[in-house]
Amino acid sequence: YLKLLADAVNEEKGQPAAQSVECLVDLPISAHIPDNYISDNAQRLEIYRRIADIRTVEDSMDVFDELIDRFGDEPQCVANLVAVAYLKALCMSLGIDRVMQADGRMDMRFSNNAQIDGEKLFKALQGFDKRLTLNAAPPVTLTMRDRTMAREDMLHLTAKVMERLLARMDA
């Protein structure tokens, strides 16, 4: 509903509708809120909504702070869930529509209609973390490689690397 409203407002202003890409994240890790961490269903649903709304690093830190204040230290599966939501938001801002993890790598595939400045992306990747590579042949994919890391560690590293990449693109 909010996207439709924003598109209608932009259309009235003579601006193009914002392109939004939904990102599917397929990772072989445990990412959920267990019943023994938040036993009340209504509270658990509220936290799931808060996590789904994460768009920035500040949002993710706010969620972590709230979790610790209300329920105590979060288990690894909850930290993973927050990291997945943050990585998803970062990827969506780049026009990435699919994230998959397998065999010591994290593949992030760009949508066919991604609105990305290729020149900025190439410049940002120059001299950047060598574990992150770009495959420009369709489907265009960013790949993070590190066969020495556990899956959960690779998730958190990839989120940090993508955050730094976006900052370099905005500089």
Image (cartoon, grey):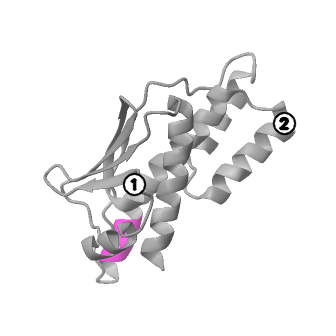
Residue picked out by circle 2: 70
In this view, 25 is above or below 111: above
Q: Residue at x 40, y 67 (%)?
A: 6
Q: Earlier in the sequence, mark 2 or mark 1?
A: 2
- The amino acid marked with disc number 2 is Arg
Q: In terms of image quadrants, where is residue 128?
A: bottom left
Q: Is residue 87 left or right of residue 4?
A: right
Q: Measure the alpha-carbon separation of dots 2 and 1.
A: 30 Å
Mark 1: secondary structure: helix
In this view, 77 is above or below 167: above
In depth, the one of 121 and 126 nearer the eye is 126
In this view, 169 is above or below 145: below
Mark 2: secondary structure: helix
**Where does the magenta region start and end?**
6-11
Which percent across, then down, holds residue 44? 68, 28
Disc ID at residue 92: 1
In this view, 63 is above or below 8: above
Which percent across, then down, holds residue 160? 55, 53
